[in-house]
Amino acid sequence: MTGELRIATRRSPLALWQAEHVATRLRAAHPGLAVRLLPMVTEGDRIQDRALARAGGKGLFIKELEAAILAGQADLAVHSMKDVPAALLDGMAIAAVLPRADPRDAFVSNQHAALGELPRGARVGTSSLRRQCQLKHARPDLEIGILRGNVETRLRKLDQGDFAAVLLATAGLERLGLGERIRERLAPETMLPAVGQGVIGIECQEKDSSVRSLLAPLDHPATRCCLDAERSFAARLGGSCQSPIAAYATLAGDRIALRGLVGMPDGSRVIADRIAGPAGDAAKLGTALAERLLAAGADALLRSLATDGGH
């Protein structure tokens, strides 16, 4: 440890908000602790002309941040957990997760008040195969357009008339003070969220006990329990950006309920199921639900996506 804690973060306004939020929490937990942000541009930020699935997946948003930690330039990194691959780099750990914000997807449109009100053939913007899959499954008539860039860029493309509507994460919009742009918060029954959606995670080296002890007071056990279920589900499926995979866990007392989904990007096939059990078995339940989906046909579906690169 140096005399200050250095946080590696992406440069997007949302990533900077999240890193500053973590810095504020750390300073509150440890009065006198110096915390500095180390903003970086990641490969995922640089690639704007094609879907992430084609470019190499969600790990593109965190590779440079992890490299900075391993090189000793930073002590920790702050991530949106939905951007973190199911399998972490060897030697790295998610040392703390903050309380989950609203995990739902947001329907944003200037002309239409709700997803159900979109006219036939309307063009909807999203870069997520998970959203595309569920949208096309419910509404095969809709046209999907690739939408990349930070939240402000995506909203600008909507305002320019490129799309009738766009789908974004509710949590991101609300963190940026843009909650008034949301026309409808989509229920998980309509649009199952991404694994870890709405959760801010803090990554450091597994062996860095001094950083881990500083982060310990920030960890939220209920959120971690739900995240464990969702991430073990994705890990068992070999989840990547190239597969439309969704999972959402909820905790009630000492019981956890998990819903999971795998589908084709064009929405032609969706396999979904749910499981519930003791909260202490969160990770086991995630794996068990994945096994159930694999047996129901997700195995062949995922293999076909891996063969043709997700298209």
Image: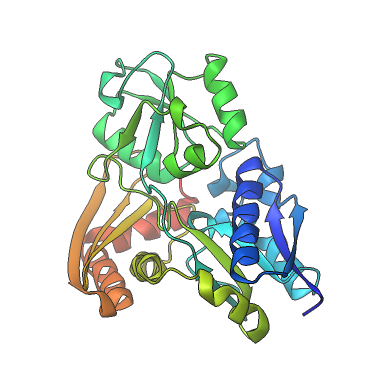
Q: Residue 128: x, y in percent?
A: 46, 42
Q: Quadrant of the C terminus?
A: top left
Q: Quadrant of the N terminus?
A: bottom right
Residue at (76, 53) in percent of width and height:
40
Q: Is residue 183 left or right of residue 45?
A: left
Q: Residue 38: x, y in percent?
A: 77, 57
Q: Is residue 234 left or right of residue 175?
A: left
Judging depth in this view, the residue of 241 and 279 nearest the camera is 279
Residue at (71, 47) in percent of width and height:
11
Q: Is residue 258 left or right of residue 55?
A: left
Q: Residue 106: x, y in percent?
A: 39, 35
Q: How many marks?
A: 0
Quarter-wise, where is residue 68 in the image? Answer: bottom right
Judging depth in this view, the residue of 262 and 167 nearest the camera is 167
Q: In this rendering, is residue 219 above or below 306? A: below
Residue at (27, 80) in percent of width and height:
280
